[in-house]
Image (cartoon, rainbow, N blue to C red):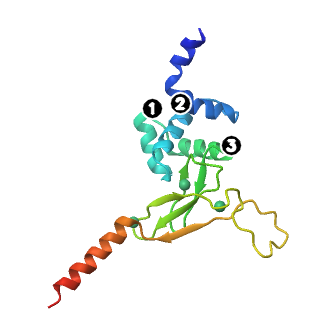
Amino acid sequence: MLVVVIAMDRRYSAVARRLREVGLRVTAPRVAVLEVLDGHPHAGVDTVAAQVRNRIGRVSTQAVYDVLGACADAGLVRRIEPAGSAARFETRAGDDHHHLVCRSCGRITDVDCVVGVPPCLTPDDDAGYQLDEAEIVFWGRCPDCHNARTTHHDEHEEARP
Ligand SMILES: [Zn+2]
Ligand SMILES: [Zn+2]
Ligand SMILES: [Zn+2]
């Protein structure tokens, strides 16, 4: 009997287990949101909502936002907000990794934490604050944008007499 139950639950099992572990009820929207985020790290709420609708049909963006909030509160989802960007979400939560952000196209790439535990950096003077996070974003240009620039530059140089 147990085998039958596990087989029936296989599609949702990994994500459902994550929800149960943090005491969240397993619902279709929650499962869909986590599965979408697993495949699209650093997605914004609109992207997540569109993908969730592809999977399970009509779900409001507000409902998706509520699911993201509940999962973030439970530690299953991490919310990041690079300057100039709408909030992005990812299921790689709780490991204090950091991000490389491209100034040109907005691409976001994970980079492992050197220290491994938050807060990553300790200020000289914490002014009595109980710190639990240091947000570190590395800004620059992604390989695609950098290469596009370099190529453009070369063409420009060659075009000169
Ligand atoms: Zn880029
Ligand atoms: Zn990340
Ligand atoms: Zn760190």
Indicate the quadrant where residue 150 lies.
Answer: bottom left
Q: Earlier in the sequence, mark 2 or mark 1?
A: 2
Vertical position of residue 48 compared to residue 152: above or below: above
Q: Which mark is residue 28?
A: 2
Q: Secondary structure at mark 3?
A: loop
Q: Secondary structure at mark 2?
A: helix
- Residue 42 relative to residue 152: left or right: right
**In this rendering, which labeled residue sits more in front, label 2 or label 3?**
3
Some atom of ligand 2 lies within 8 Å of the CB belonging to the residue at label 1: no
Q: Earlier in the sequence, mark 2 or mark 3?
A: 2
Residue at the extreme left of the image, as rendered = 161
Q: CA distance from mark 2 to mark 3?
A: 17 Å
**Is there a contact, CB below 8 Å, between mark 2 and mark 1?**
yes
Q: Which mark is residue 47?
A: none
Amino acid type of disc 1? Ile
Vertical position of residue 131 compared to residue 156: above or below: above
**Is there a contact, CB below 8 Å, between mark 1 and mark 3?**
no
